Image (spheres, helix red, strand yellow):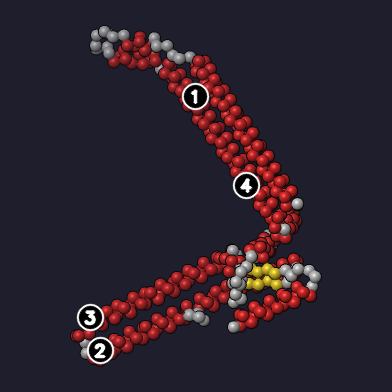
Amino acid sequence: MRKLYLFIFLASIVANTSQAQTRTTRIGYIDMEYILENVSDYKEAKAQLELKAQKWKQEIESKKIEINKLKEGLSTEKALLTKELIDERETEIKFQETEMLDYQQKQFGADGNLMRHKAALAKPIQDQVFTAVQDIAEAKNYDFIFDKSSDLTMLFSNKRFDISDQVIRVLNRTEKREQLTKKQLKEQEAKENIENAIDENPAMKDRQKVLDDRKAAREKLIQDRKAEQEAKKKEYEDRRKALQEEREAKKNGTVSEPAKTESTKTDNTSKPATTTEPKATTTTEPVTPTENKAEERQKLYEQRKKELEERKKKILEEREAAKKAKEAETQKTNTTNN
């Protein structure tokens, strides 16, 4: 019922304000939960608190297991125990159950340590959020700003009235400014002015999104080209190294050939000289290095020629795509202006 009265009261204020003033009433809202989840300090502290809560849960679970063991032991030995011993064991079990429930309530109750820690954790961030909301409201002439995650029921909320991202940017700017130099502060202020202009103009926001997408596409294309060039360079270096190793191997083979024939002769002194293998090895004609170089140069020339043609074709396609995109943007801008 209180929520209904509050909603009617706010609606009447908005109606009276719109009638009394000539300008349009500006209304915005924030989502406090969304903002807290996107603040780094809060996320780190929340993670530490969750570790504590996990530890408390483990302690409670181990206590439950211990109590269940006592109950099972009593059930097994109940026929052998006297009434006094049974009452004593049941009293002990009841005492431990009460102690466990009290500990659970202390840690996870409505006024327990977990809730108190959460409130203490969110309080400084909430204060910063309220300050940022007031700054945004004064700078951009907002009449009302609501909290979507509060007790006020919002039956419908248009996304374009959500200023949560603006609040997060203000918080991040405040944190970054403490670590920036004068030059970096000027650059940051220029960037903030652009962001504020984008927030004020939805059409500019869409245009900026298109520009950002193009910039990302260009950067990706440059990275792909660099990677392709590095791969080609590595392939060329590997091929050149392999050729050098092959030449060295051939060179070493021709130099060591006489020594090879001499060793075969000394090994076969006890046998009749019926074969002429050393002569056969010395009479083999080695492949001249000049022929290999000519073939390799021809292959490299053909490959480079092919790569240049492919690159030229790719550049022409990119220019054509950029031209079409520019024409589409110009047509969209003209349609919006009309």
Task: Tell me, for residue 85, which label it has, or none.
Answer: 2
Q: Dot 2, crowdedness within 10 Å: few (<14), some or many (≥20)?
A: few
Q: Dot 3, crowdedness within 10 Å: few (<14), some or many (≥20)?
A: few
Q: Residue at x 60, y 28 (%)?
A: 308
Q: Position of residue 193 (x, y in %)?
A: 74, 58
Measure the C-alpha gap from mark 3 to mark 4: 71 Å
| On screen, residue 34 above or below 298 | below
Instruction: Let me know if residue 191 appears in the view.
Output: no
| On screen, residue 126 above or below 299 | below
Horizontally, residue 257 falls left or right of residue 220, namely left
Q: Could you tell me if the residues under marks 3 and 4 are in contact, i.e. CB atoms within 8 Å?
A: no
The quadrant in which residue 8 appears is bottom right
First-in-chain label (2 vs 4): 2
Q: Could you tell me if the residues under marks 2 and 1 are in contact, i.e. CB atoms within 8 Å?
A: no
Residue holding disc 4:
216
First-in-chain label (1 vs 3): 3
Q: Could you tell me if the residues under marks 3 and 2 are in contact, i.e. CB atoms within 8 Å?
A: no
Q: Position of residue 211 (x, y in %)?
A: 67, 48
First-in-chain label (1 vs 4): 4
Measure the C-alpha gap from mark 3 to mark 2: 13 Å
Task: Tell me, for residue 244, which label it has, or none.
Answer: 1
Residue holding disc 3:
76
| On screen, residue 265 above or below 86 | above
| Count of marks, rendered view | 4
Measure the C-alpha gap from mark 2 to mark 1: 93 Å
Q: Residue at x 37, y 83 (%)?
A: 97
